[in-house]
Amino acid sequence: MLNCHVKSYGAVGDGVTMDTAAIQAAIDACGNAGGGQVILEAGVFLCGRIDLKSGVELHIERDAVLLGSTNAADYPELESDFWRPEYAPRFNRRCFIYAENCKDIAITGRGAIDCQGENYMRPLPPEKAAKAHWPYERLPFPEDFEDMGSKDLVPEQRIKCSFSPARVVFFIGCENVLVEDVIMRNQPAGWSYWICDCDQVHFHRAQIRANVQYPNNDGIHINCSRNVTVSDCNIACGDDAIVVRAYSMPLFKHTVCEKVCVTNCNLTSHSGAIRIAWTDDGVIRNCTFSNLNITDSAVGIDIRLPGNPTPHRHSDQGDEPTHIENLNFSNITIDRLYHEPVYIFIDDHCLCSAIRNLYFSNIHSFAVHAPTIIGRKDCPVENIYFNNCHFIQKERNEFDPNEPGLKNDREHTYTPCFRHVKNLVMQNTVISTL
């Protein structure tokens, strides 16, 4: 087992010199020797995309910063026969830290991954910001910038595509993964972590400090993976904080997402603190969410299946009926929530076979809106259990009515709404106003 100090491989760590080649050389040497630690000591290491190898632990010490480049060209597009890059979400196959088909990998240490996201964003004009969910937008693509993921897009797709790397950390097909202690900050309009088709993944004491006014900077995005734990983490971001999905299009087969456990975390999101599924995902089952604090957020538990009535597929739209079952939410405190503490919705234009067997216990919420569950006549939401839950509604003006990103930008219900729900059971559950 090696300890490879990146400065021994030529890294400077002055925040100006590009250290990509030196850091990658340390990773390669460590991986080729059977594994060990690649160590970033005190310094600011400016870097483009790096690829982890099996057996390698990227260790960022307390006074070290892995600083993302502000040049999109430093994040070359991923090409692979292991997965299908043409189905990467947001038509963007670029990332900062990448691992493919690796075993025994880790990112650890009390240092920071800083993505310099402000360099990929710009504020909306005041007249647009007043109505927008987020008051910032992505920088447009330069006219001369083309990559394989963007050049053939129709205009409405291109405007939604991110010029920045769409994922900061992207692990696909990996086994035995650890992310511990590290701080991620200043994400652009891109997901912090995308864990896709991985097994035995553990996040522990990780921190995500994104700008909540930026769109699409999700926290931990768990997709088609198994045996995943997220514990003792602090996450604040503009988009969904914890995401569990079964989007199989990048893979070569439909793959279940199951056995995800999220516990002892503090979550803030200007979208959904907990997001389950999206358009035409597959099977999501047997997951638990417990001992959570959700504050200053838009929606608490968001199980929303949007539809797509257009002829163009969404960038992360699947091709199978969504099937969600056996999810447990317990011991959750929700405060300063601008929309629904629990929101379940099945759109008319999506594929869905079932949402059933959901258990909510010991949830105490102060929110503007009430719980909402809207199934479909041909696909009712089934077997929903609330036990010892208190949902207290407060006036929006009791919070900050001008808080960016928390505007009432879609239809919400101030009174409880349960439609096309089969077997709804409430025990010792109160829904009331102050």
Image (cartoon, rainbow, N blue to C red):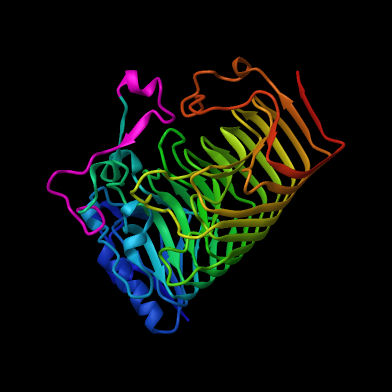
The quadrant of the picture occupied by the C terminus is top right
Image location of residue 224, percent across then percent down: 53, 64
Image location of residue 141, percent across then percent down: 21, 44
Regarding residue 237, the answer to whether it shows in the image is yes
Task: Give whichever of 41, 175 is nearer the camera.
Answer: 175
Residue 261 image-quadrant placement: bottom right
Horizontal relation, residue 118 to residue 225: left or right: left
Regarding residue 42, the answer to whether it shows in the image is no
User: Magenta stretch: residue 179 in it?
Assistant: no
Task: Give whichever of 407, 76 is nearer the camera.
Answer: 407
Residue, x 63% and y 43% (percent of image)?
377
Residue sitting at the far front: 378
Image location of residue 343, percent across then percent down: 63, 38
Q: Which residues are magenta?
A: 125-151
* Count of residue discs: 0
Q: Main secondary structure of the magenta part?
A: loop
User: Magenta stretch: residue 142 in it?
Assistant: yes
Above/below status of 231 relative to 117: below
Above/below status of 25 relative to 128: below
Residue, x 33% and y 34% (percent of image)?
137
Residue sitting at the far bottom: 33
Task: Give whichever of 260, 186 is nearer the camera.
Answer: 260
Image location of residue 172, percent across then percent down: 44, 68
